[in-house]
Amino acid sequence: MARIVFDLDGTLIDSAPDIHGIANAVLAGEGAEPITLAQAREFIGNGAGVFVAKMRAARGIADSEQERLLADFTGRYLTATDLTHPYPAVEPVLGQLKAAGHSLGVCTNKPFAATQAVLRATGLDGYFDVVIGGDSLPVHKPDPRPLDKAFAELGRGPEIYVGDSEVDAETAQRALVPFVLFTEGYRKTASALIPHAAQFSHFDDLGAIIDALLAEAAMSS
Ligand SMILES: O=C(O)COP(=O)(O)O
Ligand SMILES: [Mg+2]
């Protein structure tokens, strides 16, 4: 049986509307104009620190305000779950993968406490044997170490990482793990330009993709 690790934002859940909401609450507190949902989607993927830095840059707020605004942002993050939903068929597919004997994990750049809160709020928290957040280790994706740690905690078996972004593809490449690209998340590049072993646009197709990758790996080992 395999170890399958998932990215979170833009892969299992569409969380951009909530992240957009807290960004604009922080900006409103500064007397600054809001950012658009499209901007919020573009800024997601490298963790809360990079998100806040890009948000500040978009509104001309000085670097010296970074730590204060990041603290405001991460505080609001814990309750920002109302507008967030799993993508279609995520929950039944996670159930099927678990029932088939695979062990499942999450490796995200979202702060760990906010990750736990949103997994609980969306009802996905029961499916994962390991959850690694963006601040669980001193380094975050695309450094491969958070992904390495997730797989290590899942024990043994072939590895697959499922994610939506350039950051996830680079992380998988550096960790030497096959990458499966979900095309409906927050990537900025054409999917053909993002290195991947397989891609899908609906979770109904993921089970067959995983079976095929595992069959391929079994044949070449
Ligand atoms: O918090 C982020 O920037 C992105 O999170 P992700 O790694 O789950 O896509
Ligand atoms: Mg993502």
Image: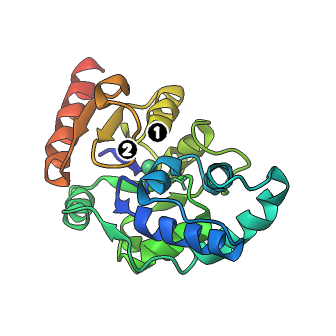
Q: Nearer the viewer, residue 182 or 61?
A: 61
Kindly state the secondary structure of the residue where label 1 is placed: helix
| Percent position of residue 165, x then y | 42, 40
Image vertical order of residue 42 relative to residue 40, above or below: above
Count of picture labels:
2
Q: Nearer the viewer, residue 13 or 215?
A: 13
Question: Where does label 1 land, which residue?
Answer: 168
> Mark 1 vs ligand 2: CB under 8 Å?
yes
Question: Where does label 2 land, which residue?
Answer: 164
Q: In the image, what residue occupies the spot 46% across and 39% down? A: 168
Residues marked 2 and 1 touching at CB (< 8 Å): yes
The amino acid pointed to by label 2 is Asp
> Mark 2 vs ligand 2: CB under 8 Å?
yes
User: Which quarter of the picture shows residue 180?
Assistant: top left
Residue placed farthest to the top in the image?
220
Q: Residues within 10 Å of mark 1 (few under 14, many from 20)?
A: many
